[in-house]
Image (cartoon, helix red, strand yellow):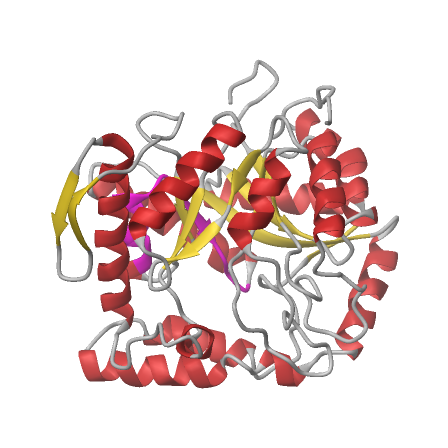
Amino acid sequence: MTSAYMEKEVEYGLFMPVGEGGWIRSTTAPPVPATYAYNRQVAILAEQSGLDFLLAMAKWRGFGGASNHWDTTLESMTVITALAEVTTRVRLIPTVHTLAFNVALVAKMLATLDQIAHGRTGLNVVSGWFRDELGQMGLWPEHISHAERYAVAGEWVQALKRLWQEERVTFHGRYVHLEDCVSNPKPLQKPHPPIICAGNSDTGLRFTIEEAQAAFINAPTHAEAAATSRRAKRLAAQLGKSIKTYAMVMIIPGQTDTAALLRMEDYNTGVDMVALQAGVASHLHEIQQAQAHGESVIPTLQRRIDRASVPDPYIPGYPYVGSAVSIARQLQEVIIDGDFDGFVLTFPGFIADLRFFGQRVLPLMADAGFARPLQPVSVK
């Protein structure tokens, strides 16, 4: 997406609020209903505001607590398919767990969605991390390691690409098996829709570089996000490949810096520690599995556990807080420091805050050469 107005190609996407409570685990955060009506409204506003893509997570079990965080969630593929009919320009990216979905089913589902959306789809591939989530459905192998989950995902994505491009596929891997498998129609996009992954460990980044086109970077600080993005691009260069990186960022805007900080302080007073710590047992189990398999993923997991032991309710990471000018400056700094290609954005309130971002922040980013000037969008 090049433009004479741009000094660097930067895309802005929205992490859709398909889960109850949105992206803040706090009882004082704005209510975010996990309804299609709300997500439809948000999607239309995102397109009108000039954003480039919509991403919907896949979540099968919430974190509970007083906030009932993510105890209700919309199914990713279904809601994204519906949003294809009310948008005209934004790319639409559902999420699938490779441990939960048969690859041939997803091949046909995405090809159908690509037809509905006139070639605007992508796919976010998740190897899985929350044992209770898939375990409740009997889909979590008891002794699977972090590296082995990515081995499953690797075979899964290789088979997926072949189904999207070949008339008949026979694939006999360790984890994925297809016998003379036929999958039609094919996606409109050639050779296939873009594939995204958010794995930030060394194993996850290597998988993303080898099998995907973009990495979503979720880090607790600006510095760590920038360092992970640079690390991904160095690793890609060493492998003779290229990769786009997108910072996952929570935006808390205000008319002034003080007003925005007061908002954040209010959310911090209602931190739901039960919801915050719900994933700790899964992380501890993964550390034990990593130790048993001699894997070097423990530092990443330990940071996740550390974040769950302090009152930091924001997903993803620590938020960017301030006036339009301050937020634009912070975004510009992370683009430069991390050589980022874009952002996956979340907000406390997805209507007023998204409208503020589109009207006040994106024009500043365009003036700085990091966004396209907003063009009129027709909405169905």
Report the span colored magenta: 204-220
For residue 242, what is the image quadrant? top left
Please tell me whether residue 285 is drawn above or below residue 379 in the rendered image.
below
Residue 168 left/right relative to 275: left
Please tell me whether residue 290 is drawn above or below residue 23 in the rendered image.
below
For residue 110, what is the image quadrant? top left
Percent position (x, y) of residue 320?
68, 55
The answer to if 225 sits in the magenta stretch is no
Residue 327 left/right relative to 215: right
Front one among 75 and 7: 75
Residue 221 left/right relative to 145: right
Front one among 322 and 348: 348
Give the residue drawn at x 62%, y 28%. 371
Q: Is residue 244 visible?
A: no
Q: Is residue 316 visible?
A: yes
Please tell me whether residue 329 is drawn above or below residue 90 in the rendered image.
below
Give the residue drawn at x 36%, y 74%. 299
Front one among 315 and 331: 315
